[in-house]
Image (spheres, rainbow, N blue to C red):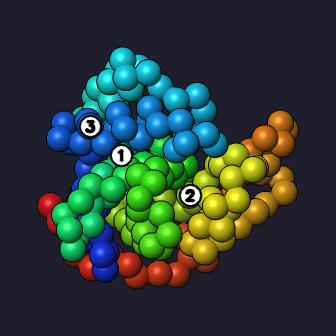
């Protein structure tokens, strides 16, 4: 699992120093409104520890990165890949509210797509989001995800969109770091 930079962002593996960010995201009712019930601090702390342990396994099925702005060295969010199979993963992104409106989620997602396709050998990445989450729907479209009718959950509460290595085109990673 590498760190990498895009035009404006450093994307690096989640670390102990990111605990405060993790807790603030998962306990914030507004950020969690389309994801689920906000965590209590205790539950968020347990989830953070579980995430760190999962990432340190020899063959992790989940990888999480912190998103940092290069200009201010400010940690602004998280993004993750949860593997559904060796060549398919589901992506997730959470940003602090003050980071919205600057096209940062698109840049972070595109960087992670490039990393996933070129370094993790993924062939498909899925994005699942609440059907009422119009902001995420716009970001998914901008980053190349497409709606496929046969992939949709039966409950109609969420939407799954996908992007494929053989059709995705993009070069967003500026530097790949150890």
User: For residue 108, which quarter of the picture?
Assistant: bottom left
**Where does residue 79 sit, x and y in percent of width and height?**
41, 52
SS type, badge 2: strand
Q: Earlier in the sequence, mark 2 or mark 1?
A: 1
Question: Most extreme residue toward the top, as rendered?
Answer: 42
- Residue 22 point in image, percent of width and height: 34, 38
Where residue 115 sits: x, y (%)?
Answer: 37, 65
Mark number, residue 64: 1
75 w.r.t. 34: above or below: below
Q: Nearer the viewer, mark 2 or mark 1?
A: 1
Q: Nearer the viewer, residue 1 or 161?
A: 161
Give the residue displayed 35% in from the left and 46% down from the top: 64
Q: Please say if 138 is above or below 168.
A: above
Sequence-first disc among 1 and 3: 3
Mark 3, residue position: 20
How far apart marks 2 and 1 lie (CA) works out to 15 Å
Q: Tell me if residue 151 comes above or below residue 119 in the rendering.
A: above
* Residue at mark 1 to residue at mark 3: CA–CA distance: 15 Å
Classify residue 53 as left or right of residue 167.
Answer: left
């Amino acid at each position: 699992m590498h760190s990498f930079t895009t035009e404006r962002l450093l994307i690096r593996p989640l670390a102990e120093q990111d605990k405060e960010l993790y807790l603030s995201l998962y306990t914030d009712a507004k950020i969690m409104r389309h994801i689920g019930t906000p965590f209590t601090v205790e539950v968020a702390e347990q989830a953070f520890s579980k995430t760190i342990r999962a990432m340190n396994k020899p063959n992790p099925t989940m990888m999480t990165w912190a998103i940092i702005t290069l200009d201010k060295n400010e940690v602004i969010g998280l993004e993750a890949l949860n593997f559904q199979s060796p060549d398919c993963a589901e992506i997730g992104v959470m940003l602090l509210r003050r980071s919205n409106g600057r096209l940062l989620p698109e840049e972070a997602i595109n960087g992670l797509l490039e990393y996933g396709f070129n370094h993790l050998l993924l062939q498909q990445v899925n994005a699942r989001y609440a059907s009422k989450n119009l902001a995420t729907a716009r970001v998914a479209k901008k980053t190349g995800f497409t709606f496929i009718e046969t992939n949709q959950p039966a409950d109609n509460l969420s939407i799954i969109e996908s992007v494929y290595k053989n059709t995705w085109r993009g070069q967003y990673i500026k530097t790949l770091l150890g």
